[in-house]
Amino acid sequence: MTAQVPKPQPFVRELLGRSDYAIIGEIVEPGSKVLDLGCGDGDLLQWLAENKGVDARGVEISSAKVQRAIARGVSVYQGDIDEGLADYPDGAFDYVILSQTLQETHHPRTVLREMLRIGRRAIVAFPNFGHWRMRLSLLFGGRAPITKLFPHTWFDSPNIHILTVQDFEELVTLEGIRVERRYFLSAGRKMNFRPNLLAETAVYLVSASSR
Amino acid sequence: MIVESNVVRFDCMPLDNGATLAPVEVAYETYGELNARKSNAILVLHAFSGDAHAAGISHVTGKPGWWDNMIGPGKAFDTNRYFVICANVLGGCRGSTGPASINPATGCPYAMTFPVITIGDMVRLQKMLIDSMGIERLLCVSGGSMGGMQALEWAVSYPDRVVSAIPIACTTRHSAQQIAFNEVGRQAIMADPDWNDGNYYSDKPPARGLAVARMVGHITYMSDDSMREKFGRRLRGKENFGYDFDVDFEVESYLRYRGSEFVNRFDANSYLYITKAMDYFDLVNGHGSLAAAFETARARFLVISFSSDWLYPSYQSQEIVRALRARNCDVAYVELQSNYGHDAFLVDVAEQTDLIRGFLASTYEKAQ
């Protein structure tokens, strides 16, 4: 038997079937106060509450999903992210999470500012429209790309503000937002090489720069 | 499950208007078992015309309680896990002290000498009842309509005594429209000569006025959709119009039936006093803002409204939620889709059951 040299593990274990959730699960510190925007039926919040002991809250626009979230014991309120954050006091949360939803908001820049007003930190995960499959699909197909990441026809798509890794980097620079950590994922692996072309999903941990 | 009402008497209680009421009785029922730590008690709060008989079959009337579909073994308020209490409100006419009660100073019914009471007074009496049971903290206070107002009052006035609150289809203060409907009801009663300035207890009650008041009420509890579905323009027991002012339409028949039935179980003076208490209720009053009113609130909240409820529209529930968010309180909120109007909180059982069961289970777990 030969001694095994532990290899660095590039694979991200999926959490609830999603690799961006696994990153978020890593980032969030135990016992913190978390608000998940567009939380769906509250599966991530429930996991964070049960495994990290967080004080979990959520916002979701779909009545059916809110009902499922409340039925599983998660405090979710039915509301619109674009309108609904103004009531929260400054610094109400340790983390405000926006997972795969930034591209669905009407005013992504305002939402990002609001997240950093009401949260000490924000976690933003989004599908990268700059991925090579999207580029090839548009180049050779000549139509709005339909891929695993963007599975909707253009007329059915909830994605109204699609963005690339590069776009997000430029926005945080423009807004003076500090990037504390950035993660890029492709096929369930963390990767760093040419993320704007090769990453399927990006996860950013950001905070207001004045801090 | 056959249930009995109990009555407990207190020597006196102070009222918001400065008066003292002595003595005071409160009628209540309980379902399930209080655990050894007394940590599983839920106070259910009835709406305007409700009473202490919330669940089970009354051993007197043989009728099920007004929220029997929500309270019982395995139901939303699961009596296998929780100890559920419901009391008739102060000013009521179903066992608790109200205008029909005998004034010990005169030996006659109070009638209109009964002091004007508030939602705050109703809740104060409930707290006296809870104190007498030795219950330190209620796991939950919950109710729809006026019951929801009482739940909010509990959370604001006795923040240390409630772990959670479920206000359903209610408001923090009546709008002009809500006050207007109540005033129509009151005027209908007072315009009935049989009302006799409230002194009708030895004679016949103002049945016509009270019935008209109830008819207006029932219209506000339904929605345009639910009335169309239930009655449409269908005629009652005839093929053609009668060309007179007897009942032609089904909806007329229904309202007349509901009105006359109400007279048998409700006191007209209680109608006046309780609607007044609802109109006076205003959580903003004395606090400056709703958010300020919730400053001391510590309960976890589940707020529910219904899409077709135009008497207590969703925007009023959303005001509650926004104020709680401004205080960073733990609040869940959903607007349920329903055609039943304000009545939905009594009728739409399945969806409310899932919500309330999950909310209570996680609240109970955290509180242990």
Image: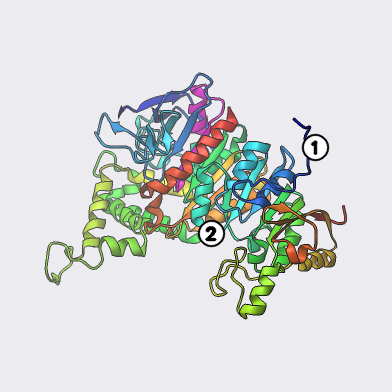
Q: CA distance from mark 1 to mark 2?
A: 62 Å
Residue A185 sits in quarter: bottom right
Magenta residue check for A101: no
How many neighbours does mark 1 have within 10 angstroms: few (below 14), some (14-19), or many (20 or more)? few
Q: Quadrant of the C terminus of chain B?
A: top right
Q: Which mark is residue B315?
A: 2
Q: Nearer the viewer, residue B236 or A197?
A: A197
Single out the residue that lies furthest toward the front. A1
Q: Secondary structure at mark 1?
A: loop
Residue A184 sits in quarter: bottom right
Specify whether A29 is left or right of B260.
right
Residue B274, percent across and down? 43, 45
The reply to whether residue B119 is visible in this rendering is no
Residue B196, percent across and down? 31, 48
Specify whether A42 is left or right of A171.
left
Q: Secondary structure at mark 2?
A: helix
Q: Which residues are magenta?
A: B124-147
How many neighbours does mark 2 have within 10 angstroms: few (below 14), some (14-19), or many (20 or more)? few
Residue A144, percent across and down? 61, 76
Kind of residue indicated by mark 1 = Val
Chain letter of the residue beneath label 2 in the structure image: B
